[in-house]
């Protein structure tokens, strides 16, 4: 039986003029919980944090309401900390359906201080939260939306094991963005920044020949990795076929509404989902479009896949000739074709599959 690994990706964005560019969806997260009776229908619910509850500066709270009647079903205000409280929860939580039956099994939430929580769900609501990671020493504000990606990845001997990957965005007061990926095995001790492998810079050898086998095995067995972006994230990162795509710009050029100052160059990043190495010839490149928007994988008029930035009715092609990672080796890739999308792919998933990509 495969062990269930949970991997979390975190991003942090900074601004010398304060925290801005909120990428959260203002609407509460929706989920499905089992019926209170054995033979009853599943219940649609909404999951609200401090922002949706209009108490953004209060201590951390989560509430479950009926999606139909808005009746309060459960709330979580008492946390397993010394005081029973945590910092405000401004990041959009995300729910986990671990067995793909359409019923939410757990919710993940992160407070603004960087405490990452796993909270089992039952028909009655919240169970006792588990502290997964503590990044409070980073002096960052974690307030951007969480995302899940379901995937397979080799661990140790190379045997593929199921993983759930959580993409998270946080904000730092200075210094730009940091992207973190945290592997959470439920028996593993609480993760801190020092447990992660620094992948900010690639060696000359790796740039020329790909990640070394020894380093690849180290990352497989470790708690995860991180990359200091030194830019501000301008769109919620997306993962397609095992590649993490995100856009960024100079910190001072990003406006509070996530638009860009005039004459700003936008940078596109493409990182290997499991070790942050390069998938294409470079891990990042500039695009000429002085615009912002949501990164979307779609078919063009010729039926070919391409990555685009979409903002309202406008769209701009970011990249064509897309690649997918494969399980053959740490650096192996193949062309991503339209007939492969959407479907589960080894070492990665697509957007249409359980919220992943």
Image (tube, helix red, strand yellow):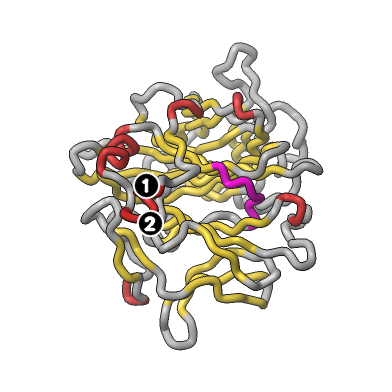
Q: Where does the N terminus fall, quadrant-wise?
A: top left
Discs 1, 2 touching: Cβ within 8 Å: yes
Q: Where does the C terminus fall, quadrant-wise?
A: bottom left
Q: Which residue lies furthest to the front in this view?
A: 204
Residue at (46% x, 78% y) in the render: 299
- Residue pointed to by mark 2: 242
Q: From which residue to which does the magenta span run?
A: 228-234
Q: How crowded is mark 2: few (under 14 residues within 10 Å), some or many (20 or more)?
A: many
Residue at (36% x, 49% y) in the render: 206
Q: Does the magenta stretch include residue 58?
A: no
Mark 2 residue element: loop
Mark 1 residue element: loop
- Residue pointed to by mark 1: 274
The vertical placement of 119 against 162, above or below, is: above
The vertical placement of 82 against 286, above or below, is: above
Q: How crowded is mark 1: few (under 14 residues within 10 Å), some or many (20 or more)?
A: many
Instruction: Indicate the position of residue 41 as horizontal and vertical percent values.
Output: 44, 50
Instruction: Indicate the position of residue 260 as horizontal and vertical percent values.
Output: 74, 62
């Amino acid at each position: 039986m495969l062990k269930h690994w949970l991997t979390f990706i975190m991003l942090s964005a900074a601004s010398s003029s304060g925290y801005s560019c909120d990428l959260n969806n203002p609407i509460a997260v929706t989920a499905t919980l089992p019926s209170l009776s054995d033979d009853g229908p599943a219940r649609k619910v909404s999951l609200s944090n401090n922002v949706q509850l209009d108490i953004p500066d209060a201590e951390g709270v989560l509430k479950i309401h009926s999606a139909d009647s808005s009746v309060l079903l459960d709330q979580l205000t008492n946390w397993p900390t010394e005081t029973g409280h945590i910092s405000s929860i401004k990041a959009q939580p995300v729910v986990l359906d671990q067995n793909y039956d359409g019923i939410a099994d757990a919710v993940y939430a992160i407070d603004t201080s960087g405490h990452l929580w796993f909270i089992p769900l039952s028909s009655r609501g919240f169970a006792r939260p588990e502290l997964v990671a503590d990044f409070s020493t980073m002096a960052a504000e974690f307030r951007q939306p969480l995302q899940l990606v379901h995937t397979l990845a080799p661990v140790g001997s190379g045997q593929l094991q199921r993983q759930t990957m959580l993409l998270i965005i946080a904000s730092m007061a200075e210094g730009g963005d940091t992207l973190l990926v945290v592997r959470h095995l439920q028996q593993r001790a609480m993760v801190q920044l020092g447990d992660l492998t620094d992948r900010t810079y690639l060696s000359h050898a790796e740039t020329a020949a790909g990640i070394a086998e020894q380093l690849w095995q180290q990352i497989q067995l470790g708690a995860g990795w991180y990359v200091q972006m030194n830019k501000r994230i301008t769109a919620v990162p997306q993962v397609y076929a095992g590649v993490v795509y995100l856009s960024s710009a100079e910190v001072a050029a990003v406006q509070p509404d996530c638009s860009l100052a005039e004459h700003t160059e936008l940078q596109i990043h493409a990182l290997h989902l499991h070790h942050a190495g390069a998938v294409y010839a470079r891990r990042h490149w500039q695009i000429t479009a002085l615009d912002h928007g949501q990164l979307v994988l779609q078919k063009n008029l010729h039926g070919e896949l391409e990555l685009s930035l979409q903002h309202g009715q406008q769209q701009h092609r970011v990249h064509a000739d897309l690649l997918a990672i494969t399980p053959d080796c740490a650096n192996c890739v193949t062309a991503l074709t339209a007939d492969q999308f959407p479907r589960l792919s080894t070492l990665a998933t697509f957007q249409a599959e359980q919220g992943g990509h």
